[in-house]
Image (cartoon, helix red, strand yellow):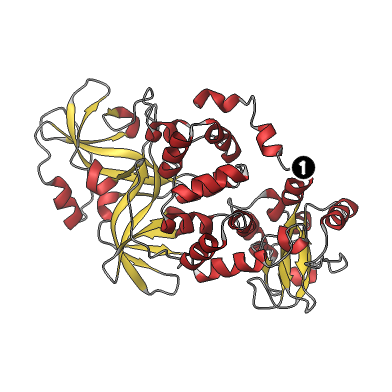
Amino acid sequence: MAAGVPRVFVSHLAGVPVFDPTGDQVGRVRDLVAVLRVAGRPPRLLGLVVEVLSRRRIFLPITRVTGIESGQVITTGVLNVRRFEQRPTERLILGELLDRRVRLVEDGEEVTVLDISVSQLPARRDWEIDKVFVRRGGKGGALRRELMGRAAPWKSGGGRRAGETLTVEWSAVSGFSLEEEGQGAENLVATFERLRPVDLANVLHHLTPKRRAEVAAALDDDRLADVLEELPEDDQVEILGKLKEERAADVLEAMDPDDAADLLSELPEADKERLLTLMRPDDAADVRRLMSYEERTAGGLMTTDPIVLRPDATVADALARVRQQDLSPALAAQVYVCRPPDETPTGRYLGTVHFQRLLRDPPYTLVSSIVDSDLPPLAPDTPLPAITSHLAAYNMVSAPVVDDGGALLGAVTVDDVLDHLLPDDWRETGFHGGEADRGA
Protein backbone atom coordinates (compact mmCIF):
# COMPACT_ATOMS: atom_id res chain seq x y z
CA MET A 1 0.00 0.00 0.00
CA ALA A 2 1.34 3.43 -0.90
CA ALA A 3 2.54 5.59 1.95
CA GLY A 4 -0.07 7.91 3.35
CA VAL A 5 -3.08 5.78 2.32
CA PRO A 6 -5.12 5.11 5.50
CA ARG A 7 -5.58 1.49 6.58
CA VAL A 8 -7.08 0.17 9.78
CA PHE A 9 -7.83 -3.29 11.16
CA VAL A 10 -11.47 -3.58 12.11
CA SER A 11 -10.69 -4.98 15.57
CA HIS A 12 -9.24 -1.55 16.37
CA LEU A 13 -12.59 0.08 15.59
CA ALA A 14 -14.84 -2.08 17.76
CA GLY A 15 -16.32 0.13 20.45
CA VAL A 16 -14.35 3.28 19.61
CA PRO A 17 -16.19 6.59 20.16
CA VAL A 18 -17.71 8.56 17.29
CA PHE A 19 -17.49 12.36 17.46
CA ASP A 20 -19.13 15.18 15.54
CA PRO A 21 -17.00 18.07 14.17
CA THR A 22 -17.39 20.06 17.41
CA GLY A 23 -15.90 17.26 19.50
CA ASP A 24 -19.13 15.99 21.07
CA GLN A 25 -19.46 12.22 21.26
CA VAL A 26 -22.48 10.91 19.39
CA GLY A 27 -22.00 7.16 19.89
CA ARG A 28 -19.71 4.15 19.51
CA VAL A 29 -18.83 1.87 16.61
CA ARG A 30 -20.48 -1.56 16.92
CA ASP A 31 -19.80 -2.97 13.45
CA LEU A 32 -18.80 -2.17 9.87
CA VAL A 33 -21.03 -2.75 6.85
CA ALA A 34 -19.55 -3.99 3.57
CA VAL A 35 -20.99 -5.25 0.28
CA LEU A 36 -19.50 -8.38 -1.26
CA ARG A 37 -18.66 -8.41 -4.96
CA VAL A 38 -18.22 -11.07 -7.61
CA ALA A 39 -15.00 -12.43 -9.14
CA GLY A 40 -13.00 -12.11 -5.93
CA ARG A 41 -13.02 -8.31 -6.01
CA PRO A 42 -12.48 -6.73 -2.58
CA PRO A 43 -15.72 -5.76 -0.81
CA ARG A 44 -16.57 -2.08 -0.63
CA LEU A 45 -17.10 -0.54 2.81
CA LEU A 46 -20.51 1.13 2.95
CA GLY A 47 -20.40 2.54 6.46
CA LEU A 48 -20.49 1.89 10.19
CA VAL A 49 -23.11 0.64 12.59
CA VAL A 50 -23.04 3.18 15.41
CA GLU A 51 -24.77 2.82 18.76
CA VAL A 52 -25.89 6.32 19.69
CA LEU A 53 -26.37 7.53 23.24
CA SER A 54 -29.99 6.31 23.32
CA ARG A 55 -28.60 2.78 22.63
CA ARG A 56 -30.26 2.74 19.22
CA ARG A 57 -28.05 1.34 16.47
CA ILE A 58 -27.97 3.48 13.33
CA PHE A 59 -26.15 3.40 10.00
CA LEU A 60 -23.40 5.96 9.37
CA PRO A 61 -22.43 6.07 5.66
CA ILE A 62 -18.68 6.09 5.06
CA THR A 63 -19.18 9.25 2.97
CA ARG A 64 -20.11 11.03 6.21
CA VAL A 65 -16.91 9.96 7.95
CA THR A 66 -14.17 12.58 7.74
CA GLY A 67 -11.56 10.81 9.83
CA ILE A 68 -10.69 7.37 11.20
CA GLU A 69 -7.75 7.85 13.50
CA SER A 70 -6.24 6.67 16.78
CA GLY A 71 -9.14 5.48 18.87
CA GLN A 72 -11.84 7.67 17.34
CA VAL A 73 -14.07 8.29 14.34
CA ILE A 74 -14.96 11.82 13.21
CA THR A 75 -18.17 12.48 11.27
CA THR A 76 -19.61 15.39 9.31
CA GLY A 77 -22.17 15.74 12.09
CA VAL A 78 -25.09 14.73 9.82
CA LEU A 79 -26.65 11.56 11.27
CA ASN A 80 -29.80 9.70 10.33
CA VAL A 81 -31.11 8.36 13.65
CA ARG A 82 -33.42 5.74 12.16
CA ARG A 83 -32.69 2.21 13.35
CA PHE A 84 -30.16 0.25 11.25
CA GLU A 85 -31.64 -2.53 9.12
CA GLN A 86 -29.26 -4.86 7.28
CA ARG A 87 -30.00 -5.33 3.56
CA PRO A 88 -29.57 -8.53 1.52
CA THR A 89 -26.31 -7.48 -0.15
CA GLU A 90 -24.71 -6.24 3.07
CA ARG A 91 -22.34 -8.09 5.40
CA LEU A 92 -21.38 -7.13 8.95
CA ILE A 93 -17.61 -7.44 9.16
CA LEU A 94 -17.31 -8.00 12.90
CA GLY A 95 -20.52 -9.97 13.20
CA GLU A 96 -20.31 -12.19 10.11
CA LEU A 97 -16.83 -12.28 8.58
CA LEU A 98 -14.56 -12.65 11.60
CA ASP A 99 -14.07 -16.10 13.14
CA ARG A 100 -15.03 -17.57 9.77
CA ARG A 101 -13.38 -20.60 8.17
CA VAL A 102 -12.03 -19.88 4.67
CA ARG A 103 -9.39 -21.41 2.41
CA LEU A 104 -6.10 -20.14 1.05
CA VAL A 105 -6.25 -20.03 -2.74
CA GLU A 106 -2.63 -21.11 -3.10
CA ASP A 107 -2.90 -24.55 -1.49
CA GLY A 108 -6.52 -24.95 -0.33
CA GLU A 109 -5.55 -25.00 3.35
CA GLU A 110 -8.40 -24.09 5.70
CA VAL A 111 -7.72 -21.08 7.93
CA THR A 112 -9.65 -19.00 10.46
CA VAL A 113 -10.22 -15.28 9.95
CA LEU A 114 -8.93 -13.36 12.96
CA ASP A 115 -9.08 -9.81 11.62
CA ILE A 116 -9.72 -7.81 8.45
CA SER A 117 -8.23 -4.50 7.36
CA VAL A 118 -9.96 -1.76 5.39
CA SER A 119 -8.13 0.93 3.45
CA GLN A 120 -9.10 4.16 1.77
CA LEU A 121 -8.65 4.27 -1.98
CA PRO A 122 -6.15 6.93 -3.13
CA ALA A 123 -7.66 10.37 -3.84
CA ARG A 124 -11.18 9.10 -3.04
CA ARG A 125 -13.52 8.80 -0.08
CA ASP A 126 -14.26 5.14 -0.89
CA TRP A 127 -12.94 2.40 1.39
CA GLU A 128 -12.64 -1.31 0.72
CA ILE A 129 -11.41 -4.44 2.44
CA ASP A 130 -7.85 -5.19 1.36
CA LYS A 131 -6.21 -7.69 3.72
CA VAL A 132 -7.22 -10.63 5.89
CA PHE A 133 -5.38 -11.78 9.01
CA VAL A 134 -5.77 -15.54 9.43
CA ARG A 135 -4.61 -18.43 11.60
CA ARG A 136 -3.63 -21.78 10.20
CA GLY A 137 -5.41 -24.91 11.46
CA GLY A 138 -7.27 -25.08 14.75
CA LYS A 139 -10.72 -23.71 15.48
CA GLY A 140 -11.86 -20.09 15.54
CA GLY A 141 -13.81 -20.43 18.80
CA ALA A 142 -14.92 -17.10 20.30
CA LEU A 143 -12.32 -15.07 18.41
CA ARG A 144 -14.91 -12.52 17.36
CA ARG A 145 -15.93 -11.92 20.99
CA GLU A 146 -12.27 -11.49 21.93
CA LEU A 147 -11.67 -9.01 19.12
CA MET A 148 -14.72 -6.94 19.97
CA GLY A 149 -13.53 -6.65 23.56
CA ARG A 150 -9.97 -5.51 22.85
CA ALA A 151 -7.88 -3.96 20.10
CA ALA A 152 -4.46 -5.56 20.00
CA PRO A 153 -2.33 -5.10 16.87
CA TRP A 154 -1.78 -8.30 14.87
CA LYS A 155 1.60 -9.44 13.66
CA SER A 156 2.20 -11.62 10.64
CA GLY A 157 3.77 -15.00 11.24
CA GLY A 158 5.84 -17.15 8.92
CA GLY A 159 6.06 -20.90 8.61
CA ARG A 160 3.25 -23.37 8.09
CA ARG A 161 2.68 -24.85 11.58
CA ALA A 162 -0.89 -25.07 12.88
CA GLY A 163 -1.75 -22.08 15.01
CA GLU A 164 0.60 -19.71 13.21
CA THR A 165 -0.76 -16.51 11.71
CA LEU A 166 -0.28 -14.57 8.51
CA THR A 167 -1.73 -11.56 6.71
CA VAL A 168 -2.82 -12.08 3.09
CA GLU A 169 -4.54 -10.11 0.39
CA TRP A 170 -8.32 -10.47 0.12
CA SER A 171 -7.85 -12.22 -3.25
CA ALA A 172 -5.65 -14.87 -1.59
CA VAL A 173 -8.56 -16.49 0.26
CA SER A 174 -11.79 -18.06 -0.96
CA GLY A 175 -15.07 -18.57 0.81
CA PHE A 176 -16.29 -14.97 1.03
CA SER A 177 -17.30 -13.73 -2.41
CA LEU A 178 -20.56 -14.22 -4.28
CA GLU A 179 -20.89 -16.78 -7.04
CA GLU A 180 -20.97 -15.11 -10.43
CA GLU A 181 -23.60 -17.48 -11.80
CA GLY A 182 -26.12 -16.64 -9.06
CA GLN A 183 -29.42 -15.12 -10.14
CA GLY A 184 -30.66 -13.57 -6.91
CA ALA A 185 -31.05 -9.83 -6.49
CA GLU A 186 -27.89 -9.87 -4.35
CA ASN A 187 -25.84 -11.20 -7.24
CA LEU A 188 -27.43 -8.85 -9.77
CA VAL A 189 -26.52 -5.87 -7.60
CA ALA A 190 -22.93 -7.08 -7.26
CA THR A 191 -22.63 -7.83 -10.98
CA PHE A 192 -23.86 -4.38 -12.01
CA GLU A 193 -21.92 -2.46 -9.38
CA ARG A 194 -19.62 -0.81 -11.93
CA LEU A 195 -22.44 0.44 -14.13
CA ARG A 196 -23.15 4.13 -14.21
CA PRO A 197 -26.52 5.06 -12.66
CA VAL A 198 -28.08 5.66 -16.09
CA ASP A 199 -26.95 2.22 -17.30
CA LEU A 200 -28.18 0.48 -14.16
CA ALA A 201 -31.47 2.34 -14.61
CA ASN A 202 -31.61 0.85 -18.11
CA VAL A 203 -31.21 -2.63 -16.63
CA LEU A 204 -33.81 -1.98 -13.96
CA HIS A 205 -36.30 -0.66 -16.50
CA HIS A 206 -36.23 -3.95 -18.41
CA LEU A 207 -36.62 -6.25 -15.41
CA THR A 208 -39.97 -7.63 -14.34
CA PRO A 209 -41.73 -5.55 -11.64
CA LYS A 210 -40.99 -8.27 -9.06
CA ARG A 211 -37.27 -8.45 -9.87
CA ARG A 212 -37.08 -4.64 -10.15
CA ALA A 213 -38.44 -4.32 -6.60
CA GLU A 214 -35.97 -6.96 -5.32
CA VAL A 215 -32.97 -5.20 -6.84
CA ALA A 216 -34.14 -1.78 -5.62
CA ALA A 217 -34.51 -3.18 -2.11
CA ALA A 218 -30.94 -4.53 -2.24
CA LEU A 219 -29.33 -1.25 -3.37
CA ASP A 220 -28.03 1.14 -0.74
CA ASP A 221 -29.84 4.48 -0.37
CA ASP A 222 -27.34 6.63 -2.28
CA ARG A 223 -27.08 4.18 -5.18
CA LEU A 224 -30.87 3.79 -5.43
CA ALA A 225 -31.29 7.57 -5.32
CA ASP A 226 -28.86 7.99 -8.23
CA VAL A 227 -30.66 5.31 -10.24
CA LEU A 228 -34.14 6.70 -9.54
CA GLU A 229 -33.05 10.06 -10.95
CA GLU A 230 -32.36 8.33 -14.28
CA LEU A 231 -35.61 6.31 -14.53
CA PRO A 232 -38.90 7.22 -16.23
CA GLU A 233 -41.52 8.64 -13.85
CA ASP A 234 -43.68 5.50 -13.89
CA ASP A 235 -40.74 3.35 -12.76
CA GLN A 236 -39.82 5.89 -10.09
CA VAL A 237 -43.31 5.89 -8.61
CA GLU A 238 -43.57 2.09 -8.77
CA ILE A 239 -40.25 1.52 -6.98
CA LEU A 240 -40.82 4.18 -4.34
CA GLY A 241 -44.27 2.76 -3.62
CA LYS A 242 -42.82 -0.69 -2.85
CA LEU A 243 -40.31 0.60 -0.29
CA LYS A 244 -41.09 0.91 3.39
CA GLU A 245 -42.09 4.51 4.08
CA GLU A 246 -39.09 5.27 6.28
CA ARG A 247 -36.71 3.92 3.67
CA ALA A 248 -38.52 5.80 0.91
CA ALA A 249 -37.95 8.99 2.92
CA ASP A 250 -34.23 8.13 3.28
CA VAL A 251 -33.91 7.65 -0.49
CA LEU A 252 -35.69 10.95 -1.18
CA GLU A 253 -33.23 12.68 1.16
CA ALA A 254 -30.34 11.18 -0.83
CA MET A 255 -31.73 12.44 -4.16
CA ASP A 256 -31.00 15.89 -5.53
CA PRO A 257 -33.74 18.14 -4.09
CA ASP A 258 -35.09 19.07 -7.54
CA ASP A 259 -35.37 15.40 -8.56
CA ALA A 260 -37.02 14.53 -5.25
CA ALA A 261 -39.51 17.37 -5.76
CA ASP A 262 -40.32 16.12 -9.27
CA LEU A 263 -40.90 12.58 -7.99
CA LEU A 264 -43.06 13.66 -5.06
CA SER A 265 -45.18 15.80 -7.36
CA GLU A 266 -46.26 12.56 -9.10
CA LEU A 267 -47.65 11.06 -5.87
CA PRO A 268 -51.11 11.48 -4.32
CA GLU A 269 -51.26 14.40 -1.90
CA ALA A 270 -51.59 12.19 1.19
CA ASP A 271 -48.55 10.05 0.26
CA LYS A 272 -46.52 13.15 -0.57
CA GLU A 273 -47.21 14.78 2.80
CA ARG A 274 -46.52 11.57 4.72
CA LEU A 275 -43.12 11.16 3.09
CA LEU A 276 -42.21 14.83 3.56
CA THR A 277 -43.05 14.49 7.25
CA LEU A 278 -40.69 11.50 7.54
CA MET A 279 -37.80 13.34 5.87
CA ARG A 280 -35.30 15.41 7.81
CA PRO A 281 -36.75 18.91 8.32
CA ASP A 282 -33.98 20.69 6.36
CA ASP A 283 -34.29 18.33 3.38
CA ALA A 284 -38.08 18.52 3.43
CA ALA A 285 -37.94 22.32 3.54
CA ASP A 286 -35.79 22.42 0.39
CA VAL A 287 -38.16 20.09 -1.43
CA ARG A 288 -41.27 22.00 -0.33
CA ARG A 289 -39.71 25.25 -1.54
CA LEU A 290 -38.99 23.76 -4.96
CA MET A 291 -42.51 22.38 -5.22
CA SER A 292 -43.94 25.86 -4.66
CA TYR A 293 -42.66 27.03 -8.09
CA GLU A 294 -44.10 26.27 -11.49
CA GLU A 295 -42.41 23.23 -13.02
CA ARG A 296 -41.00 24.85 -16.18
CA THR A 297 -39.51 27.90 -14.49
CA ALA A 298 -36.09 28.61 -13.01
CA GLY A 299 -37.47 28.03 -9.50
CA GLY A 300 -38.96 24.69 -10.50
CA LEU A 301 -35.83 23.52 -12.33
CA MET A 302 -33.12 24.69 -9.94
CA THR A 303 -31.15 22.69 -7.42
CA THR A 304 -30.86 24.14 -3.93
CA ASP A 305 -27.34 22.74 -3.41
CA PRO A 306 -24.89 24.80 -5.50
CA ILE A 307 -21.43 25.64 -4.13
CA VAL A 308 -21.86 28.73 -1.95
CA LEU A 309 -18.87 30.57 -0.44
CA ARG A 310 -18.56 33.63 1.77
CA PRO A 311 -16.56 36.66 0.52
CA ASP A 312 -13.62 35.88 2.83
CA ALA A 313 -13.15 32.39 1.36
CA THR A 314 -9.99 31.81 -0.67
CA VAL A 315 -9.36 30.24 -4.05
CA ALA A 316 -7.97 27.22 -2.17
CA ASP A 317 -11.28 26.91 -0.27
CA ALA A 318 -13.21 27.11 -3.54
CA LEU A 319 -11.10 24.45 -5.27
CA ALA A 320 -11.52 22.12 -2.28
CA ARG A 321 -15.29 22.40 -2.66
CA VAL A 322 -15.12 21.94 -6.44
CA ARG A 323 -13.14 18.71 -5.97
CA GLN A 324 -15.99 16.98 -4.11
CA GLN A 325 -16.66 13.84 -6.13
CA ASP A 326 -20.43 13.90 -5.60
CA LEU A 327 -20.82 17.15 -7.54
CA SER A 328 -22.03 17.06 -11.12
CA PRO A 329 -19.72 18.71 -13.68
CA ALA A 330 -22.29 21.48 -14.20
CA LEU A 331 -22.37 22.38 -10.49
CA ALA A 332 -18.58 22.09 -10.16
CA ALA A 333 -18.02 24.58 -13.00
CA GLN A 334 -18.51 27.63 -10.77
CA VAL A 335 -18.99 28.82 -7.20
CA TYR A 336 -21.42 31.47 -5.98
CA VAL A 337 -20.24 34.15 -3.56
CA CYS A 338 -22.83 35.34 -1.04
CA ARG A 339 -23.11 37.09 2.31
CA PRO A 340 -24.02 34.83 5.26
CA PRO A 341 -25.97 32.68 5.69
CA ASP A 342 -24.34 30.45 3.08
CA GLU A 343 -27.16 27.88 2.85
CA THR A 344 -29.87 28.63 0.28
CA PRO A 345 -31.70 30.94 0.50
CA THR A 346 -28.50 32.81 1.30
CA GLY A 347 -27.64 36.34 2.26
CA ARG A 348 -27.05 38.86 -0.51
CA TYR A 349 -25.75 37.30 -3.72
CA LEU A 350 -22.48 38.99 -4.81
CA GLY A 351 -21.58 37.12 -7.98
CA THR A 352 -20.04 34.06 -9.57
CA VAL A 353 -16.47 32.77 -9.86
CA HIS A 354 -15.87 30.36 -12.73
CA PHE A 355 -13.67 27.30 -12.42
CA GLN A 356 -11.18 28.53 -15.02
CA ARG A 357 -10.68 31.75 -13.07
CA LEU A 358 -10.00 29.72 -9.93
CA LEU A 359 -7.24 27.88 -11.77
CA ARG A 360 -5.56 31.13 -12.85
CA ASP A 361 -5.29 32.84 -9.44
CA PRO A 362 -3.05 32.06 -6.45
CA PRO A 363 -4.58 29.83 -3.72
CA TYR A 364 -4.60 32.65 -1.14
CA THR A 365 -6.68 35.02 -3.33
CA LEU A 366 -10.03 35.97 -1.83
CA VAL A 367 -12.96 34.95 -4.03
CA SER A 368 -14.57 38.34 -3.40
CA SER A 369 -11.73 39.99 -5.33
CA ILE A 370 -12.27 37.92 -8.51
CA VAL A 371 -16.05 37.60 -8.51
CA ASP A 372 -17.97 38.17 -11.76
CA SER A 373 -20.84 40.47 -10.81
CA ASP A 374 -21.75 41.54 -14.36
CA LEU A 375 -23.55 38.35 -15.35
CA PRO A 376 -27.29 38.83 -14.64
CA PRO A 377 -28.90 36.11 -12.50
CA LEU A 378 -32.24 34.49 -13.22
CA ALA A 379 -35.44 35.29 -11.37
CA PRO A 380 -37.30 32.23 -9.98
CA ASP A 381 -40.25 32.80 -12.35
CA THR A 382 -38.07 32.91 -15.49
CA PRO A 383 -39.71 30.56 -18.05
CA LEU A 384 -37.86 27.66 -19.68
CA PRO A 385 -37.33 29.31 -23.13
CA ALA A 386 -35.72 32.33 -21.47
CA ILE A 387 -33.47 30.08 -19.37
CA THR A 388 -32.33 28.25 -22.49
CA SER A 389 -31.55 31.52 -24.26
CA HIS A 390 -29.67 32.80 -21.18
CA LEU A 391 -27.41 29.73 -20.99
CA ALA A 392 -26.76 29.80 -24.73
CA ALA A 393 -26.09 33.54 -24.90
CA TYR A 394 -23.54 33.50 -22.07
CA ASN A 395 -22.05 30.05 -22.86
CA MET A 396 -22.97 28.80 -19.37
CA VAL A 397 -23.60 25.32 -18.00
CA SER A 398 -25.24 26.69 -14.86
CA ALA A 399 -26.91 29.94 -13.83
CA PRO A 400 -27.78 31.41 -10.40
CA VAL A 401 -31.41 31.95 -9.38
CA VAL A 402 -31.87 35.04 -7.18
CA ASP A 403 -35.03 36.41 -5.55
CA ASP A 404 -36.25 40.01 -5.39
CA GLY A 405 -34.36 40.55 -2.13
CA GLY A 406 -31.03 39.58 -3.70
CA ALA A 407 -30.73 36.14 -1.98
CA LEU A 408 -29.41 33.15 -3.92
CA LEU A 409 -32.13 30.49 -4.06
CA GLY A 410 -30.29 27.89 -6.14
CA ALA A 411 -28.85 27.22 -9.58
CA VAL A 412 -30.27 25.91 -12.85
CA THR A 413 -27.96 23.48 -14.63
CA VAL A 414 -27.90 22.60 -18.30
CA ASP A 415 -28.72 18.92 -17.67
CA ASP A 416 -32.00 19.89 -15.95
CA VAL A 417 -32.84 22.19 -18.85
CA LEU A 418 -32.19 19.38 -21.35
CA ASP A 419 -34.47 17.05 -19.38
CA HIS A 420 -37.34 19.46 -20.02
CA LEU A 421 -36.46 20.30 -23.63
CA LEU A 422 -36.43 16.67 -24.75
CA PRO A 423 -39.73 14.85 -25.45
CA ASP A 424 -41.58 13.65 -22.36
CA ASP A 425 -40.85 10.01 -23.25
CA TRP A 426 -37.17 10.46 -24.08
CA ARG A 427 -36.06 8.18 -21.25
CA GLU A 428 -38.39 5.43 -22.47
CA THR A 429 -37.15 5.83 -26.04
CA GLY A 430 -33.52 5.85 -24.97
CA PHE A 431 -33.97 2.64 -22.98
CA HIS A 432 -34.87 0.48 -25.99
CA GLY A 433 -32.20 -1.67 -27.61
CA GLY A 434 -29.55 -0.77 -25.00
CA GLU A 435 -26.49 -2.84 -24.29
CA ALA A 436 -27.52 -3.32 -20.67
CA ASP A 437 -30.41 -5.63 -21.73
CA ARG A 438 -27.93 -8.47 -21.18
CA GLY A 439 -28.50 -8.33 -17.44
CA ALA A 440 -32.29 -8.41 -17.58
Residue at image position (32%, 61%) is: 50
Q: Nearer the viewer, residue 2 or 88?
A: 88
Residue at image position (76%, 72%) is: 368
53 versus 105 height, above or below = below
Residue at image position (36%, 37%) is: 36
Quarter of the figure with the N terminus? top left
Res 424 → quadrant: top right
Tell me the kind of residue under disc 1: Leu
Residue farthest to the top?
107
* SS for dot 1: loop
Q: Is residue 334 visible?
A: no
Residue farthest to the right?
393
Q: What is the x, y in percent for residue 296?
A: 77, 57
Q: What is the x, y in percent for residue 59?
A: 37, 57
Q: Is residue 282 visible?
A: yes
Circle 1 residue = 422
Q: What is the x, y in percent for residue 122?
A: 50, 45
User: Image check: 382 left or right of 25?
Assistant: right
Q: What is the x, y in percent for residue 138?
A: 9, 34
350 versus 38 height, above or below = below
Q: Nearer the viewer, residue 135 or 174?
A: 174
